[in-house]
Image: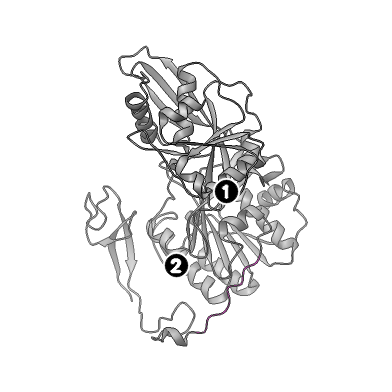
Amino acid sequence: MAKNKTVFVCNECGAETPRWAGKCNSCGAWNTLVEMIKTKTSTKNSLHMTGQNSRPVLLNEVISDNEIRFSSGIRELNRVLGGGIVPGEMVLIGGDPGIGKSTLLLQMAIQLARNGVRVLYATGEESVQQVKMRSERLNGANVEMHLVAETDVDLIISYLNQIKPQIVIIDSIQTLMTNDLGAAPGSVSQVRESAGRLLKIAKTMEMAIFLVGHVTKEGSIAGPRVLEHMVDCVLYFEGDSYNSFRILRAVKNRFGSTNEIGVFTMAESGLEEVGNPSAHLLSQRDAAAIGSVVTATIEGTRPVLVEIQSLLTETIYGTPRRMTNGVDYNRTAMIMAVLQKRAGLYLGQQDAYVNAIGGIRVTEPAADLAICLSIYSSLHNSTISRSLLAIGEVGLTGEIRAVSQIQLRVAEAEKMGFKSVIIPSNCTENLTKKYLVEIIGVKNINEALSKI
C-alpha cells in the first residue's frame, strides 16, 4: 500500500518543500506555502500525454498537420483567441465575480450547439435547472447541449469518454476535486491535479476545454500559478459591475497574439459584441467639455479612440492629491512634472484627477500628449475643439516622441469625423497617403500647447 507523505506547496510557483516556512525559497513570496498530502504512485507504466510511451524523435521527422480552427460563434472571442478555437487547446478565463464569465461561455456553447458541435457544460456551482434558467435568458433553452452538475473530476472525465464532445466547459476549476487526494476542493493540490488530468484528456482526444477561474482580491487567478503555465491560453474578463462595458483580454496565447482585445456590453439578453469600440466610447461625449481630449490607442490590430478627461482644483490640503482611473498613475505624475518644469504650468497647489472614459485601461505612452492637453485645458478652464485628436509620447525634456502604427490611428480619427490630429513631427514622414483630416506635427509640449 502506498504511503502518504505531507509536503508544502507554494501557491505562486508550485515549488514543494518538506517543511513549512514563511518564505518560499524558489520565488521569494511570503506566506504562500500550504500543506498537501501526497500519495506515492508507481510511474512504471506511465504514458505520454498523447496516450503512448514517449520517445525522442527528430524535429524534421515530425509530421505536423495544418492548424485547423473553428469559429466559437462570437466574433470578438474569435479575435482574442487568434482566429478561432484550436482542437485540443485548454483555455482559462478569469475575472471578477459577476463580470460575465459564465454568461460568455454559455453563449458560446449555445452558438456552437446550434451549429452542430457537441458541447458538454460541467458546472460545480449551479444545478442543471439553474443553467437552464440562464439559457432561457440567452434565448438558447432548446439547443441540444449536454449538462452535468458534478465536482468529481474523474466522473467528468468518464462522461467525456462516453460523449466525446468537441467543446468542454468547466465552471469552475476551483470546485473540482479527486478522491485520490485528501485535500479540500480549491486547494493547490486539487486544482493542479484536476487541471493536469483534464489537460491530458484534452490533448489525447483533441477536445477544446474552457476553464473558469476565480480571482483573488488582487485580481489574479486564484490557485497555484502553475495553472496558468499548464494551459494554452489565459484570458481575463475586465470591467466594472456598475458599467456595461466589458473587455476580454489575452495575457497568454500559444496559438495567437496576446495584444488583441474583445469588446462587449452587458445587456438583459446577455453579452452583446461591440464592433466599433471607438463609436461606443465617444457616443456620450460633451461638445463643450473642459479638460476633455481624445487620443488613439492600439489594442492588437485595432485602433481605439478613447476620451481622456482631467479635473484640476485648488487643494485644501498641504499635499495636493493625484488620482487616476484607467491611466497609469506614475506616468501621469511624471507628465505633470514635465508640464511644470518645461511648460511653466504651476501645478503644486492643484488636486489632479485624470480619467479614461468608458472603463477602458490605457497603458501605452501614445496617450501622453492627450493627458497634457486635458490638464492644460482644465487648469486654464478653457475648452479644446471637439474635432481635435492628440497622439504622442512625452519625454522628460518635453519633446514629443514618435509612436508606432500612426497610419492606423489617423485613419481611425478620419473615419470617426475628426478634423485635425496633432502628432509627433517625426511621424509625418510615415504618412504615405493623403488624409481629409488636418495633420499637425509638433516637436515639443510648448509647440503643442500653442496649436490649441
Q: Nearer the viewer, residue 409 or 126?
A: 409
**Amino acid at circle 1:** Leu
What is the x, y in percent for residue 207?
Answer: 58, 70
Q: Which mark is residue 196?
A: 2
Label 1's element?
Answer: helix
Residue 26 x, y percent position in the rendering: 25, 58
Q: Position of residue 89 (x, y in %)?
A: 53, 67
What's the residue type where badge 2 is placed? Gly
Q: Nearer the viewer, residue 444 or 350?
A: 444
Along the line of sight, which residue is nearer the eye, 409 or 286? 409
Residue at the disc numbered 1: 408
Q: Residues within 10 Å of mark 1 (few under 14, many from 20)?
A: some
Residue found at x 63% / y 73%: 164
Q: Residue at x 52, y 60 (%)?
A: 91
Is 36 left or right of 268, judged from the image as shown?
left
Q: Is residue 163 left or right of residue 448?
A: right
- Closer to the camera: disc 2 or disc 1? 1
